[in-house]
Image (spheres, rainbow, N blue to C red):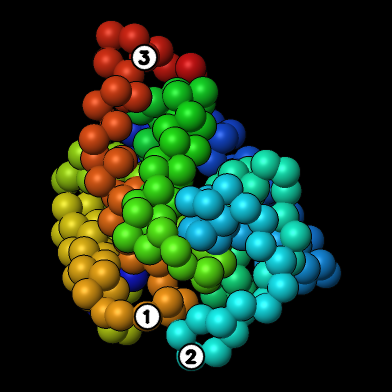
Amino acid sequence: MLFPIGDDNSARRITPVVTWTLIAINVLVFIYQMNHPEFTYGYSYVPAEITQGRDFAGSYPVAGGRVQLAPGPTPIYLTLLFAMFMHGDVMHIGGNMLYLWIFGDNVEDRMGHVRFLIFYLLTGLLASAAQIFFGPNSMIPNLGASGAIAGVLGAYLVLFPRQSVKVLFGRAIVEVPALIAIGLWGLLQFIGGFGQVSSAGDRGGVAYMAHVGGFIAGIVLVFLFRESNSRRAPGY
């Protein structure tokens, strides 16, 4: 297993203020969640709420038990945005923010601040759409920045396939091309996603199809959002 811990930022031209701001917002929201657990169960997105346009509140049966939902925003579709900045635990937010820290800055550098922000939010929404498509009646709350970050990884793979990425491999730190580091990650998401689709039941866990959807969206949309070299200027 390769676990990324850093990359080559020597060619970066701009200060990644959007990437840093997104990380800060995620951390602040997570701190708020720790003190307001009802917020998590009301503002995570539930596929059945989105497909039916209803705000469910109360206890509902799911595979393996029951889930407790709290009242959400109006309209309920706003949960698709809120959920992108929410996380389940320290490991969840820690892993996501590490990936955003490593890969987000260089993608932002190639897109510019505004384009990158739009790209990030759009791929996050498309990732959620993919998860909902494969489980439209699910009552399991979904949350996390993983889908949007998967989009960032897809864009990074297209823009910097040979970029050196430092990874933990066992107890050693080695450098591998992004094509290997991110490509292996993407392969694991596809395997997990198709396994999740083929299994029956309304189960929680990793939202693999959101990762797959975000990853594919990132690979496709990067061609629309990246700036040509002729339009880029140092410090922009």
Q: Mark 2 points at which residue?
A: 64
x, y percent for residue 177 = 18, 54
x, y percent for residue 57 = 71, 66
3D distance between C-alphas at marks 3 and 2: 53 Å
**Residue 128 seen in this snapshot:** yes
Q: What residue type is labelled 1?
A: Gly
Q: Name the residue under label 3.
A: 232
Q: What residue type is labelled 2?
A: Gly
Foreground pick, 108 / 115: 115
N-terminal of the pair, mark 2 or mark 1, is 2
Q: What residue type is labelled 3?
A: Arg
**Residue 160 seen in this snapshot:** no
Q: What element carries label 1?
A: loop
x, y percent for residue 34 = 76, 70
Residue 45 left/right relative to 24:
left
Mark 1–mark 3 CB contact (< 8 Å): no
N-terminal of the pair, mark 1 or mark 3, is 1
3D distance between C-alphas at marks 2 and 1: 9 Å
Q: Which residue is found at the position 33% from the left and 70% from the top?
A: 3
x, y percent for residue 58 = 72, 73
Q: Tell me if residue 13 comes above or below residue 98 in the rendering.
A: above
Quarter residue 110 falls in: top left
Mark 2–mark 1 CB contact (< 8 Å): yes
Q: How crowded is mark 3: few (under 14 residues within 10 Å), some or many (20 or more)?
A: some
Q: Which mark is residue 201?
A: 1
Residue 133 left/right relative to 125:
left
Q: Looking at the image, is mark 1 or mark 3 nearer the viewer? A: 1
Q: How crowded is mark 1: few (under 14 residues within 10 Å), some or many (20 or more)?
A: few
